Image: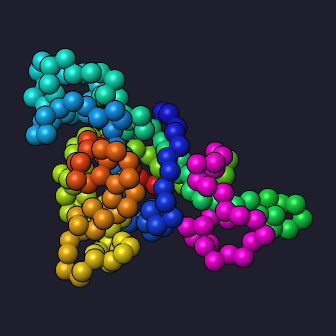
């Protein structure tokens, strides 16, 4: 079992704590050179001839998920703040659940959160690879999308979770070359459970 850090935004941390988020999608880097309708199974056999999904001579470096395999753990980095509660006893505040807390320091970015400060550990249950636009309604719900009003700015009532996920995806990834919803990048789909 290996442990690795993973970043989540405040709304996604709240969704994990509420038990609504059990999946995350992360862009595969670098993107594999597979035709737009091609498949790739995401396992480590590197395109063996008996796999119906992987092209021959597939690059084995693209078949290893950098976030881990089932059974590995992820520790969630989130925006935080050290807080001296009383008598020198160090406490930590987490912006996802204490956003209005008055403090004399500034919030620390999640990227700088050390291991000993984390409060959420996840265990990877499954790993697969797909294009981001292949997300199902059930998977969008597992991503923490409650309904069409769950993203900002809200979408029209009656639109599905996939559309809401698309808006969320682009709010995070659209500025990165080749990573927008319209680019339809290959993504790691990690299912997890909270420990």
135 or 116, nearer to the observer = 135
Residue name at image x 71 percent, y 64 percent: 106
Magenta stretch: give its range: 93-115
Residue 60 location, x and y as percent? 29, 21
Residue 26, x across and y down, in percent: 36, 46
Answer with the quarter of the image where residue 41 lies. Answer: top left
Asked if 160 appears above or below 13 in the picture, the reply is below
Q: Residue at horizontal 53%, vertical 47%?
A: 75
Residue farthest toward the right in the current orientation of the protein? 87
Is 82 one of the magenta-colored residues? no
**At 44% from the left edge and 62% from the top edge, which residue is drawn?**
12
Q: Is residue 105 magenta?
A: yes
Instruction: Give the quarter of the image for residue 99.
Output: bottom right
Looking at the image, residue 27 sits to the left or right of residue 5; the answer is left
Please state the horizontal and vertical placement of residue 156, each as a whole percent of the image: 24, 80
Q: Is residue 48 above or below residue 165?
A: above
């Amino acid at each position: 079992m290996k442990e690795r850090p993973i970043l989540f935004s405040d709304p996604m941390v709240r969704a994990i704590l509420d038990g609504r988020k059990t999946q995350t999608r992360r862009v595969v880097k670098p993107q594999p050179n597979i035709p737009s309708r091609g498949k790739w199974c995401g396992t480590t056999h590197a395109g063996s001839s008996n796999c119906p999904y992987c092209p021959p001579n597939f690059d084995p470096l693209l078949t290893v998920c950098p976030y881990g395999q089932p059974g590995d753990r992820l520790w969630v980095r989130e925006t935080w703040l050290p807080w001296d509660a009383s008598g020198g006893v160090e406490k930590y505040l987490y912006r996802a659940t204490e956003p209005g807390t008055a403090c004399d320091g500034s919030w620390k970015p999640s990227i700088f959160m050390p291991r000993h400060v984390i409060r959420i550990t996840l265990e990877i249950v499954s790993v697969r690879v797909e294009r981001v636009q292949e997300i199902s309604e059930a998977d969008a719900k597992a991503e923490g999308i409650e309904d069409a009003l769950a993203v900002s700015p809200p979408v029209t009532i009656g639109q599905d979770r996939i559309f809401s996920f698309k808006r969320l995806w682009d709010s995070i990834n659209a500025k990165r070359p080749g990573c927008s919803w319209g680019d339809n990048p290959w993504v790691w789909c990690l299912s997890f459970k909270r420990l």
